[in-house]
C-alpha cells in the first residue's frame, strides 16, 4: 500500500454498534511492533487489504512512528495508539489533548482513576476513544503480588473495569479470559479489546492469559489485538487472513437464529 503524505483529514471509526456492522477482518487489530517506520511501511504493504486496523505501540512510536498514524488514517485505515498513558493528572490531560490532534481512533490509558479522569478531560469531544488497560496480559497472580497488589487478576480487572466506566472510558483492554465476566458486569456499552490472542499452535511468548482468536470472539471481544503471530509469520498476509477467517467463523457460531 502506498501511503499518502500526511493531511489534516480526520476520519474516526464508527463503533457505536460494535456488535453487528463490522466485517470480521475489521475486528482484527494488527500490532505494528517493529522498531522503525520503513519496516512498518513494508509490513503494511504486504498485509494490504487483509488488515484495516493498525496498532502503533511504544516501540514504533519511539522510533518515529507517530506520523504514520495520520498517513494510515488518510489511506483509509484505522489507528489505535497504544501509548498506555499514566502520569500526574495534568500531564495525562495535556498529552491526551495533543494525541487527539493526530486523529487516531483508539488510545490506551493505564486503568488508574486519576489518569483515566484526566484523559477523559483531555480527549474532550475529539471522538478519540479511550481504552483503559485493566491488567496487562503478560501478568498473572505472581506478577501482581510481586508488584505489591493484594488483589488477584480477576478482582483487579473487575475493579478497574468498574472504575473505567465511572471515569467515562469508552472501553477496556483485558485478556480474553476475563471477557465473559466483564461483559456480564458492564453490558453492551463498553468496547472490549483483547490482546493475549494466539492462533492454535503458535508461540505464546511472554503472554500469560491467552485464548485463540475464535475463543476470544465467542467469549465476547469486540476487537482482537494480534502482533507477533502476524508480524513474525513467514507470510504475514496469510496469517492475518487466517485469523480474520477464524473471527468470521466464531461470529457465525455466536449469531442467534
Ligand atoms: O495487556 C496488554 C496490553 C497491550 N498489549 C499489546 O498488544 C500487543 C500484543 O502483541 P503480541 O505479539 O500478539 O503478543 C503488543 O503490542 C502489546 O504491547 C498486550 O499484549 N497486553
Image: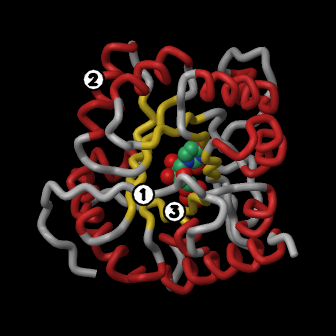
Look at mark 3 in the image and give the residue it sits on. 29
Of pointers 1 and 3, the one earlier in the residue sequence: 1
Numbered disc in front, either 1 or 3: 1
- Give the distance between the C-alpha atoms of the residues marked 3 and 2, in whole angstroms: 27 Å
- Give the distance between the C-alpha atoms of the residues marked 1 and 2, in whole angstroms: 23 Å
Please say if 109 is above or below 78: above
Look at mark 2 in the image and give the residue it sits on. 94
The disc placed on residue 13 is 1
Q: Which SS class for mark 3?
A: strand
- Give the distance between the C-alpha atoms of the residues marked 1 and 3, in whole angstroms: 13 Å
Residue 88 in the figure: left or right of residue 170: left
| Residue 177 place in picture, x, y as percent | 80, 48
| Residue 210 place in picture, x, y as percent | 74, 54
Q: Which SS class for mark 1?
A: loop
Please report the residue visible at 57 percent of the width from the left and 27 percent of the height from the top.
Answer: 111
Please say if 147 is above or below 256: above
Q: Nearer the viewer, residue 239 or 22?
A: 22
Asked whether residue 102 is in view, the answer is yes
Please say if the residues under marks 3 and 2 sit with CB atoms less than 8 Å apart: no
Amino acid at each position: 500500500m502506498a501511503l499518502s503524505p500526511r493531511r489534516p483529514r480526520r476520519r474516526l471509526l464508527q463503533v457505536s454498534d460494535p456488535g453487528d456492522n463490522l466485517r470480521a477482518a475489521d475486528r482484527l487489530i494488527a500490532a505494528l511492533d517493529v522498531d522503525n517506520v520503513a519496516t512498518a511501511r513494508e509490513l503494511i504493504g504486504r498485509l494490504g487489504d487483509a488488515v484495516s486496523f493498525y496498532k502503533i505501540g511504544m516501540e514504533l512510536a519511539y522510533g518515529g512512528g507517530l506520523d504514520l498514524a495520520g498517513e494510515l488514517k488518510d489511506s483509509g485505515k484505522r489507528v489505535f495508539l497504544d501509548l498506555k498513558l499514566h502520569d500526574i493528572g495534568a500531564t495525562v490531560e495535556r498529552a491526551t489533548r495533543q494525541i487527539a490532534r493526530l486523529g487516531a481512533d483508539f488510545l490506551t490509558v493505564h486503568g488508574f482513576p486519576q489518569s483515566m479522569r484526566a484523559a477523559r478531560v483531555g480527549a474532550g469531544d475529539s471522538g478519540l476513544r479511550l481504552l483503559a488497560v485493566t491488567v496487562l496480559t503478560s501478568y498473572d497472580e505472581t506478577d501482581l503480588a510481586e508488584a505489591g497488589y493484594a488483589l488477584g487478576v480477576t478482582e483487579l480487572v473487575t475493579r478497574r473495569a468498574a472504575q473505567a466506566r465511572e471515569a467515562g472510558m469508552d472501553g477496556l483492554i483485558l485478556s480474553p479470559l476475563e471477557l465473559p465476566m466483564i461483559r456480564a458486569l458492564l453490558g453492551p456499552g463498553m468496547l472490549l479489546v483483547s490482546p493475549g490472542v494466539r492462533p492454535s499452535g503458535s508461540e505464546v511468548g511472554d503472554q500469560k492469559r491467552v485464548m485463540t482468536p475464535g475463543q476470544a470472539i465467542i467469549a465476547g471481544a469486540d476487537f482482537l489485538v494480534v502482533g507477533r503471530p502476524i508480524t513474525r509469520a513467514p507470510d504475514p498476509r496469510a496469517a492475518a487472513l487466517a485469523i480474520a477467517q477464524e473471527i468470521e467463523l466464531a461470529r457465525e457460531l455466536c449469531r442467534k437464529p
